[in-house]
């Protein structure tokens, strides 16, 4: 971001202040040491405290103070009332703008193009309470102007090196026209301000204060607030329709002096100023039978009938209002054509105008003000109306809603009343209003408030994007099950499949460590199978989040007391909610709503008392039924393997839907001035109009990815144009940049899905603690001999791996690695491009296996019945080995269907068996060889790659290379690869692979 600096200013110290002499010696005699991101000159972040600007229309809300008083001797033949409303403008929180240059206003273009800056340097270690005895000794009324996107001062200032600095700023910079005069140098900073007689030309004076260490700071934050009182005039309830010709405020102070360090005003002169504005506002009848105008219409200070700023907001000196303060409205009523002048006292009785407040005056003949109050707060926070856009599912999850009506009346106590209300949304520019659904967090909760201001916690469900309903939710039942289903009842797992809405729970145990109600010790115990040859060095035990030996299925017994469970991410908005750890720590429950059920994936994590994630689970909401449609394949090792009907975490292909505008209103069961329902379409100055998010197409569908040996699903990749390169002609890496991250939702910003922050690998404990991290590294040449780009794992500082086998010279013969992470009975490494028996070692599912109950990741040989590992020539001799070869069986050709972005083949080498369709879902990239060649957008991030491939991992690692043996189909250009297909080929563990499970039973010979 852009920084700006200031000129050196040599102040003249006030000889009357002895303390100043000491102060100057402290501040001016020390050089600045430029370290820790501190610049030699102050750099400023400029923001506004409030999003309110001149002319903005506000609506009454819970923070509005209302006073109703009778108007004496009105001469109208009926009692009239003056309604005075006030509210703090700082309640209108500015909307931040990302990637703004430093010093640029982060709210609106209306921020002045220059401001004045003064500063006092003083000898204190902490901010002083009172500096009124000090002069502007560091800067005095320095002008700072906006040039392009940079704030440029008249010169520069150096950090003093010690003490403290108090910066005081005001905007706009003083000119004869705006009524601002800054005090002279050698005095305490103050400004004298005179209100412009021309209301349209009056200045919205802004001020800011920042107190910082004189040694310097990365930035000085100047947050400007409104220093004057803003006044607007509106029509009131039952005010006669007519033409408003003039509005006058008189009997007030028109000038004063503001002490910048304290924000205190001192008025000058007598309260004799008068400010008048001619208007041409026509208030028509509500109807032919009703001679009164609609309430809340702008007379002066707001938007006109065309929605434009009328430039008639009064900006007044903050002051005590004497009995002489008067509001006068001149108008001709439409009914009798009579010219009338309404005069009302706005002073006396300790009334005042305060800095930074908006005062609205209106005249009413009823003396009653009805204010609808709507509060929407993110549960567990104080974030009011926490909506910047509406998800394409329409679900706003876990909010606290309060809606009631506040009645203020002269002579009676203000009351908050429960009134029935409904919530509506309208999509697009001309969509009909559709009633929203309130989904409570508790089954015993109801929508209609029972108490005066009772707050409800739940979800707001607006209308979804049409594609969400027609495609993503297709084939799901909409009636929730009426029980709480225990997903782990027969067997626990790291992934649970959901097929219908309802409430679910599962045991807080490690992976598949429970089976048929008993401990499944084989899942968390290394027990190498008997076999020929010595076992290869590998894991001694399965490690927990702290790299300690897991000796029990029960996480709370292993990791200590559990604190809570929470949703880590989901790839469909509002997919699951109400994630909760029960009081015993034995179960986690969650809800899948009938309103938001759709194809998608989610991850739930559990934390211990130290706030550390100690385990996590994959929730896959799918229409896929793995009880039927299984695929049997006779492999080249003579065994038959039964595959699941789809890859793990797969979601069907779908088209796209553009974003659209969505308006929201809260409608109370009360009649408004137009005879309709009393509706809220704006809260404060925030109109309830939002963008509903788009749906990005996924042409091949998408599935979760897995780094070898980890249980944790990684976010899928998608592409909306087949063969399209999102960063073309980029260092020859085009084919890598052919996918997008699938959007994710409902995540805690502290646990956002991202890449590992370091490049030197994770151990198993770290991998468990950070299931939201895709582990990325760099090549061996730049990582001290460990190639963490290709293999994400490091065992440094742990003891769960056996030692390498070395010869007498200390040279490594067989390297120890975690080859049994997905097979607790594995005895040895596998062999690349071979049907060696080591590639057929029966798999005993482990607690690190990501598959649902009844399934596991297969041995490498399982794929050889569909695609050969090393196809022989026609004369029986061994053909070319390696990756860049088409090893498909002659009788089982692999065909690509561009319409569905998938390959078709059969389950057996002979071309017989069940049909197989494998989608081109790409992979998650381990990293490019030279990270500096990444596009700026992708630097520091994890990203999917290679839309024209499918890489499916096995439970088998190849010998000592830290590569998994895979099934692969690659349709990248022939110049890169020769459209290879094969099995039992090695690929780097750091990739995020597709998983295609098999039934976890011993394969049948």
Image (cartoon, rainbow, N blue to C red):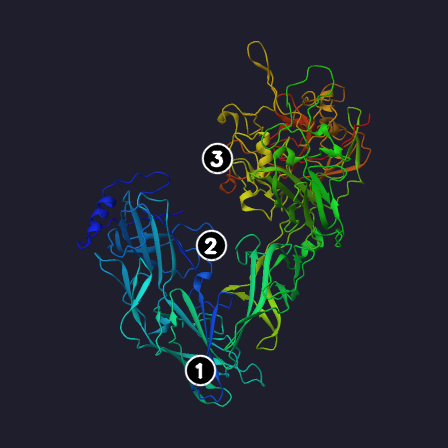
Q: Quadrant of the C terminus?
A: top right
Instruction: Give me the C-alpha separation between circle 3 and circle 1.
Output: 74 Å
Which residue is painted at 75% across and 25% down in the image?
842
Name the image quarter holding residue 261.
bottom left
Name the image quarter holding residue 826.
top right
Q: Is residue 115 visible?
A: yes
Residue 468's place in the image compared with 247, above or below, is above
Q: Nearer the viewer, mark 3 or mark 1?
A: 1
Instruction: Give me the C-alpha separation between circle 2 and circle 1.
Output: 43 Å
Q: Which residue is mark 2?
A: 96
Q: Earlier in the sequence, mark 2 or mark 3?
A: 2
Front position in the image: 190 or 194: 190
Q: Earlier in the sequence, mark 2 or mark 1?
A: 1
Q: Residues within 10 Å of mark 3 (few under 14, many from 20)?
A: few
Where is residue 409? Give x, y as percent.
52, 76
Verify CB contact (< 8 Å) between mark 2 and mark 3: no
Where is residue 743? Give x, y as percent.
60, 47
Front position in the image: 360 or 146: 360
Q: Which residue is mark 1?
A: 71
Instruction: Give me the C-alpha separation between circle 2 and circle 3.
Output: 30 Å
Q: Earlier in the sequence, mark 3 or mark 1?
A: 1
Where is residue 133? Give x, y as percent.
24, 56
Q: Nearer the viewer, mark 2 or mark 3?
A: 2
Q: Which residue is mark 3?
A: 932
Where is residue 716? Give x, y as percent.
63, 41
């Amino acid at each position: 971001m852009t920084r700006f600096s200031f000129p050196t200013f040599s102040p003249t110290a006030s000889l009357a202040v002895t303390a100043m002499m000491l102060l100057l010696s402290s501040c001016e005699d020390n050089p600045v040491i430029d370290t820790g991101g501190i610049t030699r000159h102050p750099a400023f972040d400029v923001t506004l405290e409030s999003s309110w600007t001149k002319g903005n229309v506000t609506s009454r809300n819970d923070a509005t103070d209302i006073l109703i008083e009778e108007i004496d001797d009105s001469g109208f033949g009926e009692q009239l009332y003056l309604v005075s409303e006030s509210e703090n403008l700082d309640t209108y929180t500015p909307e931040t703008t990302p990637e703004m240059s430093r010093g640029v206003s982060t709210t609106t273009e209306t921020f002045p193009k220059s401001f004045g800056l003064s500063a006092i340097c003083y000898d204190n270690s902490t901010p002083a309470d009172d500096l009124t005895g000090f002069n502007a000794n560091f800067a005095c009324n320095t002008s700072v102007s906006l040039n392009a996107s940079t704030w440029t001062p008249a010169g520069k200032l150096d950090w003093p090196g010690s003490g403290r600095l108090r910066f005081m700023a005001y905007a706009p910079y003083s000119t004869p026209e705006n009524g601002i005069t800054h005090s002279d140098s050698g005095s305490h900073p103050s400004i004298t301000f005179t209100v412009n007689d021309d209301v349209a030309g009056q200045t919205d004076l802004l001020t800011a204060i920042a107190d910082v260490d004189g040694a310097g700071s990365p930035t000085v934050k100047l947050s400007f607030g409104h220093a004057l009182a803003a006044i607007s005039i509106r029509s009131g309830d039952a005010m006669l329709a007519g033409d408003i010709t003039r509005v006058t405020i008189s009997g007030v102070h028109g000038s004063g002096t503001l002490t910048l360090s304290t924000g205190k005003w001192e008025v000058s002169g007598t309260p004799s100023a008068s400010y008048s504005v001619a208007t041409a506002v026509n208030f028509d009848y509500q109807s032919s039978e009703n001679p009164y105008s609609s309430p809340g219409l702008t007379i002066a200070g707001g938007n006109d009938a065309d929605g434009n700023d009328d430039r008639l907001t009064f900006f007044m000196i903050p002051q005590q209002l004497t009995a002489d303060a008067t509001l006068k409205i001149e108008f001709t009523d439409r009914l009798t054509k009579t010219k009338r002048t309404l005069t009302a006292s706005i002073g006396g009785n300790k009334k005042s105008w305060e800095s930074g407040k908006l005062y609205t005056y209106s005249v009413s003949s009823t003396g009653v003000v009805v204010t609808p109050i709507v509060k929407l707060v993110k549960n567990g926070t104080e974030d009011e109306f926490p909506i910047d856009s509406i998800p394409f599912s329409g679900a706003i999850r876990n909010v606290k809603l309060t809606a009631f009506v506040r009645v203020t009346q002269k002579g009676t106590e203000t009351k908050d009343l429960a009134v029935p209300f409904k919530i509506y949304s309208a999509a697009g520019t001309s969509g009909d209003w559709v009633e929203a659904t309130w989904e409570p967090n508790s089954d015993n909760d109801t929508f209609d408030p029972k108490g005066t201001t009772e707050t409800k916690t739940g979800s707001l469900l607006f209308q979804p994007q049409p594609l969400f309903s027609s495609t993503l939710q297709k084939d799901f039942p909409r009636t929730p099950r009426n029980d709480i289903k225990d997903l782990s009842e027969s067997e626990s797992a790291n992934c649970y499949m959901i097929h219908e809405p309802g409430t679910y729970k599962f045991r807080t145990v490690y992976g598949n460590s429970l089976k048929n109600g008993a401990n499944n010790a084989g899942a968390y115990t290394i027990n190498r199978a008997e076999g020929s040859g010595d076992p290869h060095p590998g894991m001694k035990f399965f490690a927990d989040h702290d790299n300690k030996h897991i000796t029990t299925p029960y996480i709370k017994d292993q990791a200590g007391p559990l604190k809570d469970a929470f949703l880590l991410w989901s790839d469909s908005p509002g997919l699951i909610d109400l994630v909760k750890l029960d009081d015993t720590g034995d179960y986690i429950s969650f809800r899948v709503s009938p309103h938001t059920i759709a194809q998608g994936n989610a991850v739930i994590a559990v934390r211990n008392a130290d706030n550390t994630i100690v385990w996590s689970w994959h929730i896959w909401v799918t229409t896929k039924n793995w009880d039927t449609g299984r695929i049997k394949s006779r492999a080249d090792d003579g065994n038959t393997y039964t595959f699941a009907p789809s890859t793990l975490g797969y979601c069907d292909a779908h088209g796209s839907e553009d974003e659209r505008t969505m308006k929201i209103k809260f409608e109370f069961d009360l009649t408004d001035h137009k005879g309709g329902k009393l509706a809220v379409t704006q809260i404060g100055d925030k109109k309830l109009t939002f963008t509903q998010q788009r749906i990005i197409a996924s042409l091949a569908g998408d599935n979760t990815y897995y780094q070898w040996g980890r249980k944790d699903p990684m976010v899928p990749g998608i592409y909306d144009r087949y063969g399209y390169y999102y960063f073309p002609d980029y260092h020859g890496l085009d084919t890598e940049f052919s996918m997008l991250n699938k959007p994710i939702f409902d995540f805690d910003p502290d646990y956002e899905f991202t890449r590992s922050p370091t490049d030197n690998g994770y151990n198993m404990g770290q991998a468990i603690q950070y299931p939201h991290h895709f582990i990325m590294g760099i090549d061996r040449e730049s990582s001290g001999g460990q190639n963490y780009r290709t293999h994400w794992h490091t065992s440094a500082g742990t003891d769960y791996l056996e030692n390498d086998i070395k010869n007498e010279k200390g040279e490594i013969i067989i390297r120890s690695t975690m080859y049994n992470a997905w097979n607790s009975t594995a005895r040895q490494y596998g062999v690349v491009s071979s049907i060696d028996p080591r590639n057929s070692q029966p798999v005993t599912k482990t607690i690190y296996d990501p598959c649902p109950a009844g399934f596991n990741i297969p041995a490498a040989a399982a794929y050889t019945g569909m695609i050969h590992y090393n196809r022989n020539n026609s004369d029986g001799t061994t053909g070319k080995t390696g990756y860049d070869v088409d090893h498909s069986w002659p009788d089982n050709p692999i065909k690509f269907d561009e319409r569905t972005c998938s390959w078709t083949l059969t389950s057996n080498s002979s071309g017989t068996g069940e049909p197989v369709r494998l989608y081109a879902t790409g992979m998650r990239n381990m990293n490019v060889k030279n990270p500096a060649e990444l596009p700026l957008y992708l630097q520091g991030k994890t990203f999917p790659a290679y839309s024209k491939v499918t890489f499916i991992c096995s439970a088998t690692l190849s010998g000592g290379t830290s590569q998994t043996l895979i099934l692969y189909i690659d349709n990248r250009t022939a110049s890169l690869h020769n459209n290879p297909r094969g099995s039992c080929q090695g690929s780097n563990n750091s990739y995020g692979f597709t998983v295609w499970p098999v039934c976890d039973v011993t394969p049948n010979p």
